[in-house]
Image (cartoon, rainbow, N blue to C red):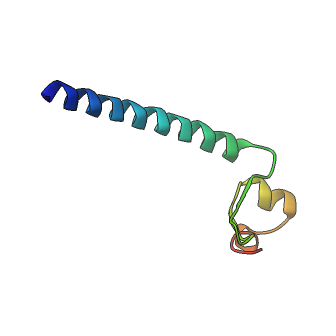
Amino acid sequence: MHDLARALESAALREDLVRERSERRFRALVERSADIVMVVDSDHVVRFVSPAGPRLLHRNESEIVGRS
């Protein structure tokens, strides 16, 4: 049973590392993109805008995020 617990813990740690690496790559891609990337919720409210958004829209981030 001890080996099973160790194997499950090891697998969980590997999954966490893979997820973290993937998130870092995605974040770098979004932050460096020349395109606007937005996250909009089901109520059509902007929850995130990439750095290109305010620059290309000639707005402050606060004028975009939180608005529909």
Q: Is residue 22 left or right of residue 29?
A: left
Name the one closer to the observer, 56 or 17.
17
- The image shows residue 9, relative to residue 64, as above or below, that is above
Q: Is residue 14 left or right of residue 4?
A: right
- The image shows residue 56, relative to residue 46, as above or below, that is above
The quarter holding residue 62 reads: bottom right
Where residue 20 appears, as percent x and y from the top left, is 47, 39
Q: Residue at x 50, y 34 (%)?
A: 21
Q: Is residue 13 left or right of residue 1?
A: right
Q: Count the numbered circles shown.
A: 0
Where residue 19 appears, as percent x and y from the top left, is 48, 38
Q: Is residue 29 left or right of residue 1?
A: right
Name the quarter where the C terminus is drawn: bottom right
The quarter holding residue 12 reads: top left
Name the quarter where the N terminus is drawn: top left
Q: Residue at x 34, y 29 (%)?
A: 11
Name the one closer to the observer, 21 or 8.
8
Where residue 10 appears, as percent x and y from the top left, is 29, 29
Where residue 49 appears, as percent x and y from the top left, is 71, 59
Name the one closer to the observer, 52 or 67.
67
Residue at the farthest left position: 2
Name the one closer to the observer, 58 or 39.
39
Residue at the farthest front position: 1
